[in-house]
């Protein structure tokens, strides 16, 4: 029976995954180096250094909102190539030494470029994956981002210790160029829809920017990503507090390995058994990982928490994206992808700002306990927003 299944690992699928990997490799590489650069090079305050990191995500949100509205009318391939060229051009701005204000502007427009390019690549991959392998395919594709989350920070920290920032920025520019070049070799098939066109009206209308059918699962993703942002942004501070700094350097590598091992299984399980068979266990695993993190007193427990969080949140990400695509008509797939990523980026981007006010009141251990409870709340929200609906409804619009 497996021999009759549509092919997933096509040339175009590999190309789009590789292009996405290089984009996010730049993102995560700069994520761990740009704040230090702002302080060392421009003598920026801690607030300005933090803004240099976070304003990139604000730019990404703006890019997603803007392009999600018009991507179907412009065309996925044109949008992708434009986004990649824009990404390359804005990467060049890092070489201009004009003060902290210009660096903040550079980060904003660079994030905007990533928002445009990654929304296009996410839409294209959802388009080229066979419908009956959507969950499995998006799971594999999203591993390109997962690899970047592990490799990017490692390369960034290594280069910041052994090279100049000019070399770091040159390397990021080269990665952007590579992403563009390989993208030129992929073919994007025309979308076979039910004959409807995604309507874009003049003036402000929420449905021009947000796909209503994808919004429920996107909101669940946003709340879950706030929980993960507590790990992404504060795990090093927590590790210092509990004297596990050496072990902390392996946290995201273990997290990434857990995702790489589990996603092929969860993606296929989702296609065969439905989203609920994957989503409920992942919320529980995510909560268990955060709870374990709150109790960590040695390296084994610390890294075991990374495994559980990888099994949990790592698969919540990919499965939620697959759900957003499945519940949406094909002619609005680009808007659905944009809606999902807007929610994900909002949680990861603004979560640390909110959590920053909570930490002085709770400390890190209680913070992660609270985040574990929030992860369980997400399971309840998921039930009411999507889980209680019949699984066949996910496939109905795409089979039409």
Image: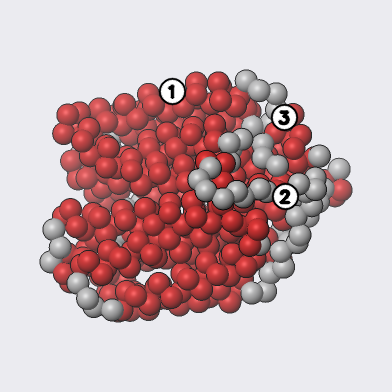
State the image coordinates of residue 296 (x, y, percent, origin top left).
29, 33
- Which residue does the numbered mark 3 point to in the structure image? 393
Q: Disc 2 or 1, which lies upstream in sequence?
A: 2
Residue drawn at x 31%, y 31% as measured from the top left: 368
State the image coordinates of residue 85 (x, y, percent, origin top left).
51, 73
Q: Disc 1 or 3, which lies upstream in sequence?
A: 1
Residue drawn at x 64%, y 32% as measured from the top left: 275
- Is the Cβ of the residue at disc 1 closer than 8 Å to that at disc 3? no
Q: Locate residue 122 relative to residue 50 in the image: left or right.
A: right
State the image coordinates of residue 193 (x, y, percent, origin top left).
78, 48
**Residue located farthest toward the front when viewing the structure as drawn:** 202
Neighbourhood count class around disc 3 (C-alpha, 10 Å): few under 14, some 14–19, many 20 upward: few
Q: Which is nearer the eye, 124 or 209?
A: 209
Neighbourhood count class around disc 2 (C-alpha, 10 Å): few under 14, some 14–19, many 20 upward: few
Q: Locate residue 209 relative to residue 199 in the image: left or right.
A: left
How many marks do you count on the picture?
A: 3
Provide the secondary structure element on which disc 2 rests: loop
State the image coordinates of residue 205 (x, y, percent, origin top left).
53, 42
Residue 263, located in which quarter of the rendered image? top right
Neighbourhood count class around disc 1 (C-alpha, 10 Å): few under 14, some 14–19, many 20 upward: some
- Which residue does the numbered mark 2 point to in the structure image? 197
Provide the secondary structure element on which disc 3 rests: helix
- Which residue does the numbered mark 1 point to in the structure image? 377
Quarter of the image for the N terminus: give it: top right
Q: CA distance from mark 3 to mark 2?
A: 21 Å
**Residue 137 seen from this side:** no
**Residue 357 seen from this side:** yes
- Is the Cβ of the residue at disc 3 closer than 8 Å to that at disc 2? no
């Amino acid at each position: 029976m497996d021999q009759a299944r549509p092919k997933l690992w096509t040339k175009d699928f590999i190309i789009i995954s590789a292009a996405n990997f290089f984009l996010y490799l730049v993102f995560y590489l700069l994520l761990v180096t740009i704040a230090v650069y702002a302080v060392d090079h421009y003598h920026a305050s801690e607030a300005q250094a933090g803004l240099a990191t976070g304003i990139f995500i604000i730019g990404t949100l703006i890019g997603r909102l803007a392009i999600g509205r018009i991507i179907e009318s412009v065309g996925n391939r044109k949008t992708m190539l434009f986004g990649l060229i824009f990404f390359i051009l804005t990467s060049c701005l890092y070489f201009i030494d004009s003060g902290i204000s210009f660096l903040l502007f550079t980060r904003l427009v660079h994030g905007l470029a990533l928002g445009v390019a990654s929304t296009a690549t996410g839409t294209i991959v959802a388009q080229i994956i066979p419908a009956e392998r959507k969950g499995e395919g998006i799971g594999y594709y999203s591993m390109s981002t997962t690899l970047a989350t592990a490799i990017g920070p490692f390369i960034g920290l290594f280069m910041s210790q052994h090279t100049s920032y000019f070399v770091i920025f040159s390397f990021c520019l080269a990665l952007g160029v590579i992403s563009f070049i390989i993208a030129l070799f992929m073919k994007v098939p025309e979308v076979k829809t039910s004959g409807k066109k995604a309507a874009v009206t003049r003036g402000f209308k929420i449905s021009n920017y947000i796909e209503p059918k994808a919004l429920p699962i996107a909101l669940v993703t946003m709340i879950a990503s706030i929980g993960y942002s507590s790990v992404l942004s504060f795990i090093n501070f927590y590790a210092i507090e509990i004297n596990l700094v050496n072990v902390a350097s392996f946290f995201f590598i273990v997290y990434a390995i857990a995702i790489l091992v589990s996603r092929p299984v969860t993606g296929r399980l989702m296609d065969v058994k439905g989203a609920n068979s994957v989503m409920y266990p992942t919320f529980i695993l995510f909560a268990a990982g955060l709870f374990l993190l709150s109790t960590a007193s040695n390296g084994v427990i610390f890294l075991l928490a990374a495994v559980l969080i990888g099994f949990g949140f790592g698969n919540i990400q990919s499965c939620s994206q697959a759900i957003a695509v499945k519940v949406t008509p094909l002619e609005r797939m680009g808007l659905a992808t944009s809606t999902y990523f807007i929610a994900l980026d909002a949680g990861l981007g603004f979560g640390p700002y909110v959590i920053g006010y909570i930490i002085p009141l709770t400390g890190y251990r209680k913070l992660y306990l609270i985040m574990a409870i929030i992860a369980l709340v997400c399971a309840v929200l998921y039930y009411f927003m999507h889980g209680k609906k019949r699984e066949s409804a996910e496939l109905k619009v795409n089979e039409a």
